[in-house]
């Protein structure tokens, strides 16, 4: 509970009764307010914090958090698949209490190119929405996150942070809280299933000999494509290059050819499952499939 100094208390006691009541209510509301964000941790180049959504822990034991990352101009951090350079963030929630499950959502990334290498990630700011599920829904959650992440500009710097939030079932952010809306905004940027944004991935096929294979993806959109990009996640040791795009006359269809990298080996990609993230401006979908040989 908030402590009031003797000097402030003397000032309050001299107030008009109505003003005294207002002052008491202000102190009461401040002292009972729940934290909706952890302190920022980091440097001038990058800082992170945990933010809470609204409503507290619900009857099913769930609550939305957000990992907010703030980056200085020229710096970037990485998606779950960093591409040809960089490293994905690592999350350690083991010090938490009353957490049964952690579900991290990933807003659609953008492609960065530097020194002949492509990477996937975020610049300026990103919020990774995090759905926590409690073991005991009626009890508070103590969220404790040890985070390791990398930021890059002209150089790359590994970063660490230890973040914490205490989340009561009756968590009530202040009326001026902006964090719930911020989490919802980035949730809207998480790629959804096919059809939600009018885009589909119609077919996937692989051609060519081991070491020189090409992944061919055909996609359709209800509205003309603007500047589509495709991120492919597959099993080790496979990597995927930048897609070469061929549009139909009305730009409602696009064929994407991606080189498949496998290092020095001659391993052949055949019936392995691939996760495809198709991004076109603010629209994004995610779809997993096995390409046809």
Image (tube, rainbow, N blue to C red):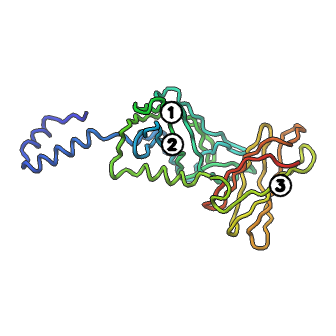
**Outermost residue toward the right?**
209
Structural crowding at the residue carrying mark 2, measured as other residues with C-alpha within 10 Å and reported as few (<14), some (14–19) or many (≥20): many
Circles 1 and 3, Cβ within 8 Å, touching? The answer is: no
Look at discs 2 and 3 and give the one toward the viewer. 3
Where residue 57 appears, as percent x and y from the top left, is 42, 38
The answer to whether residue 197 is above or below residue 16 is below
Task: Tell me if residue 109 comes above or below residue 40 in the rendering.
Answer: below
In front: 117, or 198? 198
Return the mark for residue 145: 1
Tell me whether circle 2 and circle 1 mark residues in contact (CB < 8 Å): yes
Q: Secondary structure at mark 3?
A: strand
Q: In this figure, which residue is indicated by the disc labeled 2?
A: 67
Closer to us: 70 or 25: 25
Assign a secondary structure to mark 2: strand
x and y, in percent, of residue 173 in the image: 36, 46
**Front position among marks 1 and 3:** 3
Q: 6 above or below 277?
A: above
Mark 2 to mark 1 CA distance (whole Å): 10 Å
Rendered image quadrant of residue 83: top right
Q: Residue at x 83, y 51 (%)?
A: 215
Q: Earlier in the sequence, mark 2 or mark 3?
A: 2
Residue 222 placed where, x, y %? Answer: 69, 67
Residue 67 percent location from the top left of the image: 51, 42
Label 2 – label 3 distance at C-alpha: 35 Å
What residue is shown at x 77% (from left), y 54% (from top)?
242
Q: Residues within 10 Å of mark 3 (few under 14, many from 20)?
A: some
Label 1 and label 3: CA atoms lie apart by 40 Å
Give the mark, 2 or 1, whose residue is nearer the N terminus.
Answer: 2
Picture disc at residue 120: none
Left or right of 223? Residue 212 is right
Query: Where is mark 3, residue-wise?
Result: 216
């Amino acid at each position: 509970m908030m402590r009031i100094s003797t000097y402030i208390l003397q000032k309050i006691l001299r107030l008009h009764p109505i003003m005294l009541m207002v002052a008491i209510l202000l102190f009461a509301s401040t002292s009972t307010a729940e934290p909706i964000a952890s302190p920022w941790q980091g440097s001038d180049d990058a800082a992170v914090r945990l933010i809470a959504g609204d409503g507290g822990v619900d009857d099913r034991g769930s609550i939305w958090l957000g990992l907010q990352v703030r980056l200085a101009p020229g710096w970037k951090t990485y998606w779950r698949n960093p591409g040809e350079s960089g490293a994905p963030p690592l999350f350690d929630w083991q010090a938490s209490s009353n957490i049964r499950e952690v579900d991290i959502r990933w807003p659609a990334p953008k492609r960065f190119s530097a020194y002949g290498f492509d990477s996937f990630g975020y610049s300026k700011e990103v919020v990774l929405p995090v759905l926590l599920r409690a073991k005991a829904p009626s009890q508070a959650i103590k969220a404790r996150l040890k985070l390791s992440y990398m930021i890059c500009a002209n150089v790359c710097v590994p970063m660490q942070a230890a973040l914490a939030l205490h989340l009561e079932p009756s968590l009530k952010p202040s009326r001026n809280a902006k964090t719930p809306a911020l989490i919802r905004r980035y949730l809207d940027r998480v790629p959804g299933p096919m059809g939600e944004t009018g885009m589909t991935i119609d077919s996937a096929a692989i051609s060519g000999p081991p070491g020189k294979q090409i992944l061919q993806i055909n996609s359709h959109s209800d509205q003309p494509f603007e500047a589509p990009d495709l991120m492919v996640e597959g099993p080790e040791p496979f990597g995927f290059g930048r897609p070469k795009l061929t549009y139909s006359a009305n730009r409602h269809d696009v064929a994407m050819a991606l080189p498949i990298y496998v290092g020095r080996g001659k391993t052949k990609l055949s019936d392995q499952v691939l996760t495809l993230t198709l991004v076109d401006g603010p629209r994004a979908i995610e779809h997993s499939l096995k390409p046809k040989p």
